[in-house]
Image (cartoon, rainbow, N blue to C red):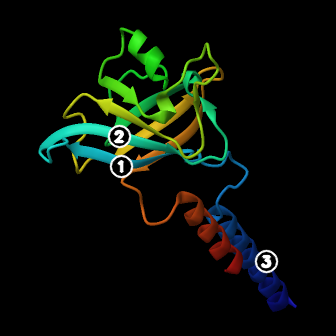
Amino acid sequence: MVISVILALAITIALAALVLLMALQMPNLSLDPEVPVIFKITKIRHIDSYGRMTYESRVILQNTAKTGYQNWNLYAITYVNGKKIPAEIPTLNANEQAADTHHHGVQVLEGEGASGSRKNGNAVWTSGERLAIDYSDQTIHPEDSVTIEIYDATTKKIISRDTYPHTEESNQEKMMDLYLSRQGA
């Protein structure tokens, strides 16, 4: 009788420990999902139009969403190797950026994603369009990791984040693989 009670207690403790270990290793899917990549970094140019290495620091972004965004209502924060750089990008509209005399670290915004006029209602970064941010030369080097976060100026909330160079698989795929591997265990 004593042996059966000890055995039942040992099995109960072992099962409780197993459930606890599984719960601790499972990703918390109730937290906000990762920030999506809506504006993807497609290229970073380090050479000039003559093919010379000038550390040009020109970043090309593409709107990968199916919808357009008012470029005048977006702003960007840039990180190089995990450190925020002093590049002020208070708007992604080229006309309004040029009018702002306080932008340091960014020479120019250009591309169809940065064009248009808020007054005319055509300042929209539509799906598939590209936008180039020309940082001051030598801001970014070929071996650097660059992260660009795009925010909605009205809500001050982040709507997109991308890091370049890109990894083999997306973070969402990694999270799903982790979740499914825990399910099968």
Number of labelled discs?
A: 3
Amino acid at pointer 2:
Val
Q: Quadrant of residue 110?
A: top left
Given residues 65 and 119, the one toward you in this image is 119
Q: Earlier in the sequence, mark 1 or mark 2?
A: 1
Using the image, determine if residue 53 lies above or below residue 68. Answer: below
Question: What residue did someone put label 1 on?
Answer: 43
* Quadrant into which the C terminus falls: bottom right
What separation in Å lies between label 1 and label 3 (alpha carbons)? 56 Å
Left or right of 78, for residue 159:
right
What separation in Å lies between label 1 and label 2 (alpha carbons)? 6 Å
Q: Residues within 10 Å of mark 1 (few under 14, many from 20)?
A: some
Residue 124 x %, y %: 59, 29
Question: What residue did someone put label 3 on?
Answer: 12
| Residue found at x 55% / y 40% | 160
Q: Residues within 10 Å of mark 2 (few under 14, many from 20)?
A: many
Amino acid at pointer 3:
Thr
| Residue found at x 69% / y 80% | 184
> Marks 3 and 2: in contact by CB < 8 Å?
no
Give the numbered dot on residue 59.
Answer: 2
Badge nearest the viewer, 2 or 3: 2
Instruction: Label 2: state its secondary structure.
Output: strand
Left or right of 34, for residue 141:
left
Amino acid at pointer 1:
Lys
Q: Quadrant of residue 95?
A: top left
What separation in Å lies between label 2 and label 3 (alpha carbons)? 58 Å
Q: Earlier in the sequence, mark 2 or mark 3?
A: 3
| Residue found at x 43% / y 34% | 111
Residue 42 x %, y %: 41, 50
Residue 31 x %, y %: 69, 47
> Marks 2 and 1: in contact by CB < 8 Å?
yes
